[in-house]
Amino acid sequence: AQSVAQPEDQVNVAEGNPLTVKCTYSVSGNPYLFWYVQYPNRGLQFLLKYITGDNLVKGSYGFEAEFNKSQTSFHLKKPSALVSDSALYFCAVRDLSSGMRFGAGTRLTVKP
Amino acid sequence: EAQVTQNPRYLITVTGKKLTVTCSQNMNHEYMSWYRQDPGLGLRQIYYSMNVEVTDKGDVPEGYKVSRKEKRNFPLILESPSPNQTSLYFCASSLGLERFTDTQYFGPGTRLTVL
């Protein structure tokens, strides 16, 4: 079965510094990987996805993610964090039999 | 505006009192799904539907029912709620699973408390 793991419950960074939110995956076949963000009292919003092609995927709000097949990772990155980036981030993998499988989530806090 | 709506947004109820959480999408999506979100566990799928009259169990279906009589609606039914069903519930929809590049759209969530 497809699965993803987010090894960090919490990530803290200072505003202006680069941020990384980690995700590793386990799939049979080609991976279809996603990042979603959840702001307080809101539903999940799509950030970006990797289907095939370039290993560096660019998404919304200046975020990007790097697909690394050898390390089975799909880390989310941003060169310069904003306080408004503080939110809960979910990595997910497409399971073609049932839909989407999500990681446990990583809470990102960006401090001024 | 393309959206997924859920009602109610907040609900406090008592053990055993049947309730329904509605979900509706206006994007003509084939696929719909229900998730529950619990701290430290992320989102876990309850039920999903590939199309009208087609539903299937997700990872945590016990204590829940769904129906898909129309393409736009996918209600979640708790016949006899229990305190362990206290959670934040999300409905989501997408074009269809066969479309590998598909993205899911989420509703705003329903916070349910069962006393």
Image: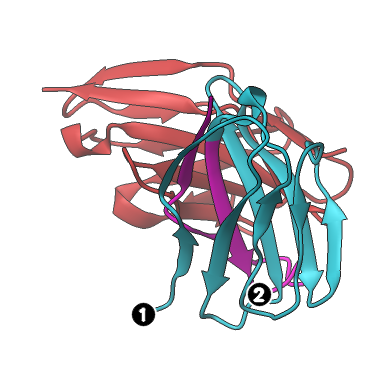
Chain colours: A red, B cyan
Instruction: Let me know if residue B27 appears in the view.
Output: yes
Residue type, mark 1 in image = Glu
Query: Within 10 Å of the Cα at label 1, are there few (<14), some (14-19), or many (20+) other Cα atoms?
Result: few
Residue matched to label 1: B1
The CA span between labels 2 and 1 is 16 Å
- Secondary structure beneath label 2: loop
- As for residue A45 lying within the magenta part, the answer is no
The residue located at (18%, 32%) in the rendering is: A83
The residue located at (86%, 70%) in the rendering is: B54
- As for residue B109 lying within the magenta part, the answer is yes
The residue located at (66%, 46%) in the rendering is: B18
The residue located at (73%, 45%) in the rendering is: B79
Q: Is residue B100 left or right of residue A66?
A: right
Q: Based on the displayed image, in which of its 4 quarters is residue B82 positioned?
A: top right
Q: Which residues are magenta?
A: B88-115
Q: Nearer the viewer, residue A22 or B89?
A: B89
Query: Within 10 Å of the Cα at label 2, are there few (<14), some (14-19), or many (20+) other Cα atoms?
Result: some
**Is the same chain shared between marks 2 and 1?**
yes
Q: Nearer the viewer, residue A85 or A39?
A: A39
Chain containing mark 2: B
Image mark for residue B95: 2
